[in-house]
Image (cartoon, grey):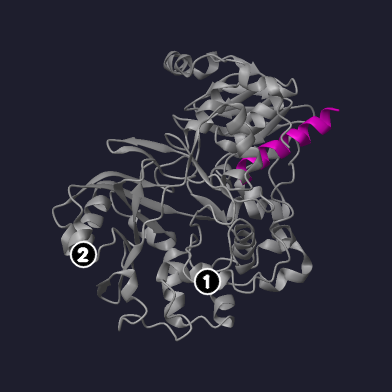
Amino acid sequence: MPIIGKRSHLISRRNLAVISTGLIAASTVSRRALAVESADVIVIGAGLAGLSAALNLEAQGFKVIVLEAANYVGGRTKTLDLSVGPTNTGGQTVGPYYARLRDFITRLKVPLVPVPRRIAMGNYVNGSLMPSSAWAKSKANKTNDAERGIQPDALEFFYMSKSNPLSDPASWTEAAYSKYDVPLDRYLRDLGASAEALRLIDISINARSLASCSALGYLRDIKLLQWGINNSDTKNRSTYQAGSDAGYEYNEIAGGTQRLPEAMAKALKGDLFLNRAAGSIEMSKSGVEVTTIDGHRYKAKYAVSAVPFSALKNIDVNPGFAGPQADAVLHSSHGNTVRVFMEFTSAFWESDIGEPSLFTDTAIERVFARVSEASEIYALDCWVNGNAANRLDQLPTDVVGEFVISELARIRPSTKGRLKVLKVHSWAKHSASGCCRHVFDAGQVAPWAGVMATPHGRLHLAGEQTRSMENGMEAAATSGERVALEILERES
């Protein structure tokens, strides 16, 4: 259970608007004139990991200051308030084993809603547009006999859940499983995946590519997912499809996932400063000093980095990381996702294949129909992962939106003139984190998994990349609790 005390959610803190006012005033002051602020712990990053660490530390009597590079709290749980309603860019589902997250939700009285119904996904593959019901017998389906009945978006889970060798999600770092720390495409070929299945899985996989990412890292994540679903029929289940099967509880946060970190930020006693990107961390035997890129300085006994390694590697840390830990911080791979949110003027899908969502083998990859809390389709969400997302990032943001609209019109003529771009969001291009998630590349688990969460002097490391077995938002919240315990033990 989390170590956060019952009193944490009852304590108010200064309004975030005061912070914004302070930022404006501070911008007129020279760097030399900026006073040094002191605390027991400086937390870098106001995502779920950083806020979890801060609240747990405050509950134990520590004075904490939180620094956030972005102009909002939540990190990768950002919710866009679009004209069609609140829409999440990351961090969607509260899973059945999200104990820490659910504890915060309960304490802070953040309302939950059921996961909306899943919308069936049609297919555009090898130049043919078809409903999901036509896939198995389509001439465009070039997979092998065992795969023909599997929808393209379900091939990933079909193979990764098939005879998963891990005894449980926590066993993935045991020496007996190191033989699976190989490229995922090799592992899938050994299971019998055809070249066409590999091509289609490479579209849905949330990594740079099948050839780069570690099968072992993915087997860990899939094993945990298998604990939270009914496995009686895994033939046509997408990897991160949420549903309340066999009594397992899945939820979403009412009004968008970002409402949770916002509630956590309001529960803080100490200061949380937005638009304060850390530039350097200087450590001595007795303490740390964090300097932001705009010259603000903060001193404390300890610091917590609650940002992805993609952001931490841009902070000057002295003394620097060494050995495998330095390799992990500087060279870890991170998944990228580009999302293009669109509104529609009419139900175009009723005039072609009958399904609004679409899996494609084109540059726009997948389009999901988004469903509101009232179970109504309210928007479309083009979701592009990995190298395909990196390629789109080479284009100006407005061009990406226009490209998605035009490509959809080409492969699905019923959409022509009926779509409008609401927002384009790239996690690599438009966020302080610079990524959507950490991914182990092949061969990295053995040298790195054991050191990624190890404290470096007086700097403690949190974030989903330090997870042992948890996934997503729960991994972030759990890591925040862990670093709070580490600091508490050092002070006891």
Q: Residue at x 68, y 62 (%)?
A: 445
Residue 236 is situated, as x and y percent measured from the top left of the image, at 46, 69
Q: Residue at x 36, y 45 (%)?
A: 375
Residue 21 is situated, as x and y percent measured from the top left of the image, at 43, 14
Pick the residue in front: 305 or 54.
Answer: 54
Q: Is residue 268 above or below residue 143?
A: above
User: How far is disc 1 from disc 2 in space, using C-alphas?
Assistant: 27 Å
Q: Is residue 94 above or below residue 355?
A: above
Asked if the stretch drawn in magenta spans residue 476, the answer is yes
Q: Badge 1 is on which residue? A: 158
Characterize the magenta stretch by its predominant secondary structure.
helix
Q: Splitting the image into 4 quarters, where does residue 388 fall?
A: bottom left
Query: What range of the chain is rendered magenta?
Result: 475-492
Residue 180 is situated, as x and y percent measured from the top left of the image, at 67, 72
**Which quadrant is home to the C terminus?**
top right
Residue 25 is situated, as x and y percent measured from the top left of the image, at 44, 13
Q: Residues within 10 Å of mark 2 (few under 14, many from 20)?
A: some
For residue 363, side relative to residue 387 (left or right) = left
Q: Splitting the image into 4 quarters, where does residue 139 fall?
A: bottom left
Q: Residue at x 42, y 34 (%)?
A: 255
Question: What number is the disc on residue 422?
Answer: none
